[in-house]
Image: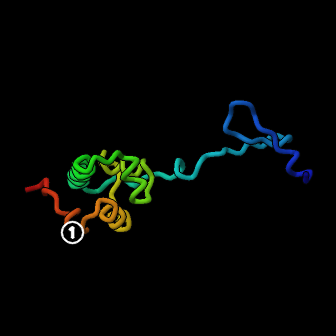
Amino acid sequence: MHPAWQEWKRKPNKDRWTRQFGCIYEATPFHLSVKLAPVKNPTGVAAFGTHLRRLREARAYSQQALADQADVAKATIQRIENAQFAVTIDVLISLARALHMPLRELMDYPNPEE
């Protein structure tokens, strides 16, 4: 083993790695370090999240099953349904395919401002 690798030691029950001379490096998964941008249209995002939840439940999909079919993370489905995430067109296309419906139909939900 290379000597540089031998310098690294795992602290017990911590998510940190230290070198013998004391520098600390945080081991934070990338998806946890990304800050989500605030939602600009919370009413519309909430309405779409409710619509997606209804479509998912009508097909008897769990959040995990829909996430697997759409090839997105379960957390993405949760954030959409809880109005914490404005959906990208890429995710919309994946969701429409996973729900076996045209994108136009997926986007046809009641306008909350009417």
Q: Is residue 89 left or right of residue 15?
A: left
Can residue 46 be seen here? The reply is: no
Q: Position of residue 45 (x, y in %)?
A: 25, 54
Q: For the image shown, how many numbered marks are present on the structure?
A: 1
Q: Residue at x 50, y 53 (%)?
A: 34
Protein image colouring: rainbow
> Pointer 1: what residue?
104
Q: Position of residue 70 (x, y in %)?
A: 39, 59
Q: Is residue 62 left or right of residue 54?
A: right
Q: Residue at x 23, y 52 (%)?
A: 55
Q: Position of residue 113 (x, y in %)?
A: 11, 55
Q: Residue at x 45, y 52 (%)?
A: 73
Looking at the picture, which amino acid does disc 1 mark?
A: Arg
Q: Nearer the viewer, residue 63 or 108?
A: 63
Picture layout, residue 20 above or below residue 76? above
Can residue 93 be seen here? The reply is: yes
Q: Position of residue 104 (x, y in %)?
A: 21, 69
Q: Is residue 59 left or right of residue 3?
A: left
Picture layout, residue 47 above or below residue 9? below
Q: Residue at x 26, y 51 (%)?
A: 59
